Amino acid sequence: MEYRRLGKSGLQVSVLSFGTWVTFGKQIDNQLADQLISTAYEAGINFFDNAEIYARGKSEVVLGNILKGKDWARSSYCVSSKVFFGYEEGRPNQTGLSRKHIVEGCHAALKRLQVEYIDLFFCHRPDKNTPIEETVWAMNTLIQQGKILYWGTSEWSNDEIMQAYVFAERNHLIGPTMEQPQYNMFERAKMERDYLLLFRDFGLGTTIWSPLSSGLLSGKYIDANPANTRLNIEGMDWLKERTLGDESKLEKTSQLYVLANALGTSLPKLAIAWCVKNKNVSTAILGASRLEQLKENLGALEVLPLLTPEVMERIEQILQNKPVQPMY
Ligand code: NDP
């Protein structure tokens, strides 16, 4: 396993990490969840990602029980939670980034995860109804109280993150350490264009999500619609539409599949390696609903040496979606 600094912070995260969205507390049973966490940890993964909204708190309960049952030093791994969408009914103040929901959300996540502190605590989305100042103050307070160690954002715009940095600096508060954006071969704009100044000037770290675009980049949807996947779970039609709705992505996926075979590897490994080849990625969060998937994906780092400039160029020719840099 390779470890990278989470941006300019002193925290070392494994470049591959493991997340629980859709799977824990929902798609898979707790025994498999335990096997996945053990396999990830034994492979050197030291960051497990979670959120209050995942299975409405159940995902954190499952992870918390698993971690409690292990004899692993607390210092050997990091856990996250994310606040914004809520875990209750969604009444006013049960969602968002007000001081009230951030503090209550943190306390609830600490209980569900059964930990004394959360290593990485994210604002899961920007909150248009709360001044960023209030959010920065609330996060700074939680750090001072020792309830969280680092705070960050997820799917915030460049301007919103910049505003948080500037406010924190001006008031000698601790600003965001990391952002959690989607990043994969089909979703590149934030990582490769929007955040470049944040990387250069503020040392923003990133914990990127959906490196396989929810399984599309495993190649299993080329000419097929396997029934036992997240896209066919009841209530996930929106994700199916987002993932499979664009025919051109399937066409590109089959070309990438051929390329991966020609390189003597598999498409999921190639797709994950492509993400972590970007040095602004601190860690790529893997997801898996089966043990074999995780074991395969953990092999992605072996593919990094195959990503020569020629191969990267061939991938660009297939994708045709490189974000254009501003001219000024
Ligand atoms: P991926 O894009 O890698 O998708 C993972 C899913 O793809 C698996 O659960 C499995 O689903 C399928 N899959 C994975 N590997 C293989 C394989 N080798 N062969 C075939 N199918 C495979 O990542 P996620 O979308 O799960 O995102 C990872 C993590 O990122 C999440 O767990 C969460 O922690 C975080 N996240 C954060 C978000 C945010 O807003 N901040 C949003 C989304 C995720 P199946 O078997 O069901 O097809």
Image (spheres, grey):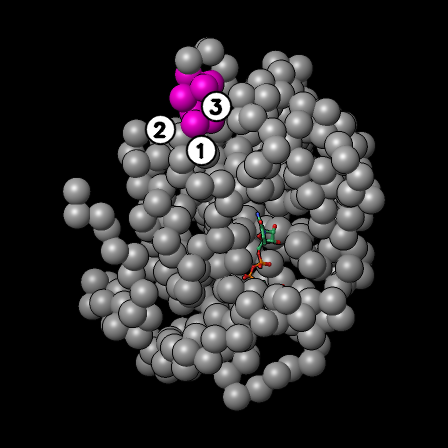
Q: Nearer the viewer, residue 258 or 240?
A: 240
Q: Position of residue 229 (x, y in %)?
A: 67, 73
Q: Position of residue 64 (x, y in %)?
A: 76, 41
Q: Earlier in the sequence, mark 3 or mark 1?
A: 1
Q: Which secondary structure, mark 2?
A: helix
Report the mark closest to the observer, 2 or 1. Answer: 1
Write down the quadrant of residue 241 in the picture: bottom right
Query: Is 161 above or below relative to 292?
Result: above
Side of 325 where 72 appears, left or right: right
The residue at 61%/83% (across/down) is 225
**Pointer 3 and pointer 2: residues touching (CB < 8 Å)?**
yes
Tell me the residue that label 2 is attached to.
202
Mark 1 Cβ inside 8 Å of ligand 1: no
Side of 225 where 12 appears, left or right: left
Q: Earlier in the sequence, mark 2 or mark 1?
A: 1
Q: Which secondary structure, mark 3?
A: loop
Question: Is residue 196 something that shows in the picture?
Answer: yes
Side of 161 where 125 appears, left or right: right
Q: Position of residue 127 (x, y in %)?
A: 59, 36
Q: Nearer the viewer, residue 320 or 238?
A: 238
Q: Nearer the viewer, residue 69 or 204?
A: 204
The residue at 37%/53% (across/down) is 189
The magenta-colored residue range is 163-169
Tell me the residue that label 1 is attached to.
161
Spatial distance from mark 2 to mark 1, Cα to Cα?
Answer: 10 Å
Q: Amino acid at mark 2?
A: Phe
**Pointer 2 and pointer 1: residues touching (CB < 8 Å)?**
yes
Q: Which secondary structure, mark 1?
A: helix
Tell me the residue that label 3 is attached to.
175
